[in-house]
Image: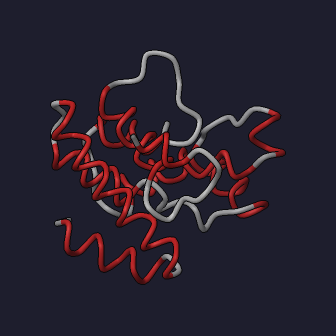
Amino acid sequence: MDIETITQKLKNELDDKRYLHSANVMDISVELAGLYGADPEKARLAGILHDCGKNYKGERAKEYIRKTGYRADKIEMVQTKLLHGIIGAHLAKEEYGVADPDILSAIRWHTTGKAGMTTLEKIVYVADYIEPLRSFEGIDEMRK
């Protein structure tokens, strides 16, 4: 699936605010990829798709996770928002045709992070944190 088709599908799947957030993360991810020597096309896809699993909340998230075979831990089952990266990686593969493990992993880990993250994983993680719609004390310093 090409980027135009993906963005159009996401516009239909996500509410306007979430889509704008995803588009911003995509743009920041591409910018950071240029600064840190990562593949900008991988960054573009991971950025736009990073929250494609965000509509799965509560029991719906738990049910989706069970169908994938992923064994969520106790914390994830209580804090189901933590599952959207896992769900997103699965949706990116199954619904958006993304086969690249680097992109899928960046989507998977964009919320919680992990030890030994790749450059692309770090880029999407940071882009999600600093994108222009985020507003909290210290955000300007973080963006620098």
**Side of 103 where 37 appears, left or right:** left
The quadrant in which the N terminus is found is bottom left
Locate residue 21, reporting x and y percent.
Answer: 45, 66
Q: Is residue 88 above or below residue 39?
A: below
Q: Quadrant of residue 131?
A: bottom left
Find residue 53 and report its horizontal and vertical position in percent. Answer: 53, 59
Question: Quarter of the image containing the C terminus?
Answer: top left
- Relative to 25, is 142 above or below? above
87 to the left or right of 33 = right
- 80 sits left or right of 120 in the view: right
Extreme top residue here?
116
Numbered label tally: 0
Q: Quadrant of residue 103?
A: top left
Question: Residue 45, image x and y in percent?
Answer: 27, 54
Q: Which residue is rendered at x = 52% and y = 76% of the image?
A: 17
**What residue is rendered at 49% in x and 53% in y?**
88
The residue shown at (42%, 83%) is: 12
Q: Nearer the viewer, residue 19 or 78?
A: 19
Position in image of residue 136 (x %, y %): 63, 54
Colouring scheme, one of rainbow, by chain, secondary structure, one colour? secondary structure
Question: Position of 44 compared to 88: left or right?
Answer: left
Q: Is residue 66 above or below residue 6?
A: above
Nearest the camera: 116 or 76? 116
